[in-house]
Amino acid sequence: MPNSDRIPAADAALKNFLTHANLPALLPAIVQLTGDASLLTRFAPPTTPMMGAVEGDLSPVDQAAIREIAFDALVAYRDGDGTLPSLPSDETLVEMMNWCAGEPLPPEYVPLAIEEAALAEADPRHFEWNAPPDAKTLEDYHVIVIGGGFGGICAGIRLGQAGIAHTIVEKNPELGGTWHENSYPDLRVDVPNHFYSFSFEHNPHWSNYFSMRDEIKGYANDVAKKHGVDGHVRFGTEVLRAVYDDASAIWKVRVRGADGQEEVLDANAVISAVGMLNRPQTPDIEGLDSFAGPSFHSSSWDHDLDFKGKRVAVIGTGASAMQFVPRIAEQVSELTIFQRSAHWASFNEKYRAEIEDEFKWCLAHIPFYHSWYRFLLFWAGSDRAFPVFQIDPAWEHPERSTSEANDLFRMGASMYIEDQLGGDPELIKKCLPDYPPLGKRPLMDNGWYSTLVQDHVELHNDGIEKIVPEGVVTKDGRTIEVDILILATGFHAGKFLWPMEIEGRDGAILNERWEGGENPKAYLGITMPEFPNLFCLYGPNTNPVLGSVIYMLECQTTYIMSCLREMLENGHRSIECRAEVQDEYYERLDTAMDGMVWRHPKVSSYYNNKHGRVITNIPWTMYAYWDMTKAVDLKDYKVV
Ligand code: NAP
């Protein structure tokens, strides 16, 4: 009897759906469904696997044969007893990974793939106790999570699974963090969405490969609701200060509620999930406050403003400006963009593409297919590209790039930019960065260059002298009169946990330990000496640049939960990172960092502090970080 719940498609429809499937993900899924590993040697792997429905470099004959085999396997599954085989052996999984990726991967990626792609079960990172503490212990324990973005939601889910009492303190009236706060036109994620999502909450319904802000915020809220996170949140409440009381091993967390009332909450442990990009940075430009018209930061978009026919100035040309500038250019009469330095932006044909229903169907209904698609995006979008970010000390053109791979990237991106600018030499000179690609946050072209060539748009890069009531005075003496001024000048990314005041053991002030916030350091980006039972999500040196922040948040949450498990199961009051462990970690980290493009002498960005140290990014692969954060080793900690 056909089972329409399992594979809800008749033969003809199924055949049609399969014509839209991504074949690098489909074949391993079918191998997993059928147990027939010989398929992996029957077909040569694709050498350029990518997102979307891919023909790639598989021959038309192979493509047709793979679809035919998939059809037969899915019909057999649909019409059979619905049994799914158990996970293949590690050896077979390596072959499957290699085929999907189109290149050999180190075998140690197998356990990571099983987790990250949820190959065997929906939530392999689900929290489990080794020896569950008694109910009273759990009842008496309380964790405060600061922030309700993706990090806070992830922590809330795991704390809920553990049955640990917790409160999420969120300054906004809604969950979503940066996806709640930012709402400027055309805001979308620029990491593939099927990877930029929780590993345990696959979403086959993403409307785009890179979906828009409302959909991502909606996803975060839906996941939070499904896991009961929302019931633990105190909205409109901001943490002002947290002080550790050594005698009781309790954090005293001072909060201010929506009504302005302050109160102190007690916590056995505190998890900071405040994000890195949520304290807007307004530029220090003379006269900024004197501007007569409306002026706002890109993260506080004024949706009541009508841009039609207005003269608008935008300061900043980073990821935010890249997205909204082309949209407002469509409405305004004049647009002047003030660029301090050029950014590298490249093209992705899927960036603005909607996902076809047939492709969504495959993700929703073909067993293991979503997992393998996620694995493909994980690999292609993160560790595979790691070498392009590295400095090859023997590279012969260090003035323009960092390695042969980086140089190839440069050539491709330069050609693209020159082409988009229609060969205009002046614009090309302004838009081609002088530093190696990937030195700053890589951007995806959202129509930026085709906007710059429009007659009513001017890109200015001679610097701003001051702001006056009627507009912007440039360093070359021009006054550009504008009606609206938009600051797309980024965030205080390097000021971790700021502006909260954190006082640890024996009066240690975190901001002072971090040299006025200039030099933040945390072991694994998570814990700090002198600050027992305080954990960070997305802390110093954990920005992935390549890959998805959500991946990092999951790794960190796993680690933090393993700390809490150790403490609660063994009756430890506190754990505190040993200073020498952090020092040794930073020796390794800074040495690795010296080999990364962000340390190139021509690069200056929010990744670096004023001494040039990179304080935001991680200089290792996604695999390496997963390996480091799988579980706590209490030898790294002082345990009380
Ligand atoms: P940003 O990348 O830090 O860009 C800020 C821009 O403002 C830069 O062009 C910077 O110039 C310029 N600027 C800063 N201070 C200035 C001053 N005093 N005078 C003149 N120009 C000044 O900020 P963002 O665009 O808001 O993006 C921040 C981060 O958020 C991104 O790197 C990314 O990680 C994330 N983000 C992600 C997405 C996405 O995934 N879709 C979208 C938006 C943002 P310089 O380049 O010379 O420093």
Image (spheres, rainbow, N blue to C red):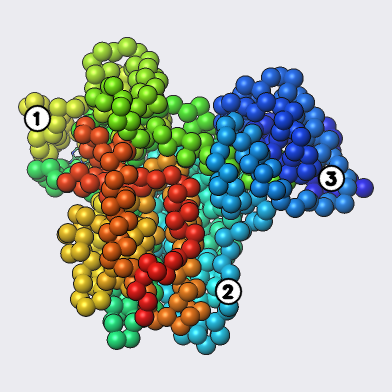
Q: Cβ of disc 2 within 8 Å of ligand 1?
A: no
Going by the numbered disc 1, the residue's amino acid type is: Lys
Q: Report how far apart the C-alphas of labels 2 and 1 lie in the structure.
A: 65 Å
**Residue pointed to by mark 1:** 475
Q: Residues within 10 Å of mark 1 (few under 14, many from 20)?
A: few
- Judge depth for marks 2 and 3 and give the one in front: 2
- For the point 45% across and 34% down, the residue is 385
State the image coordinates of residue 456 (x, y, percent, origin top left). 28, 22
Please give the label number shown on residue 130. Answer: 2
Q: How crowded is mark 3: few (under 14 residues within 10 Å), some or many (20 or more)?
A: many
Question: Image quadrant of ligand 1?
Answer: top left
- Marks 2,1: beta carbons within 8 A: no
**Residue pointed to by mark 3:** 78
State the image coordinates of residue 153 (x, y, percent, origin top left). 48, 62
The numbered mark, 2 or 3, whose residue comes first in the sequence reads 3
State the image coordinates of residue 221 (x, y, percent, origin top left). 51, 58
Residue 482 found in image quarter: top left
- For the point 61% across and 24% down, the residue is 56
- For the point 20% across and 69% down, the residue is 509
Going by the numbered disc 2, the residue's amino acid type is: Asn
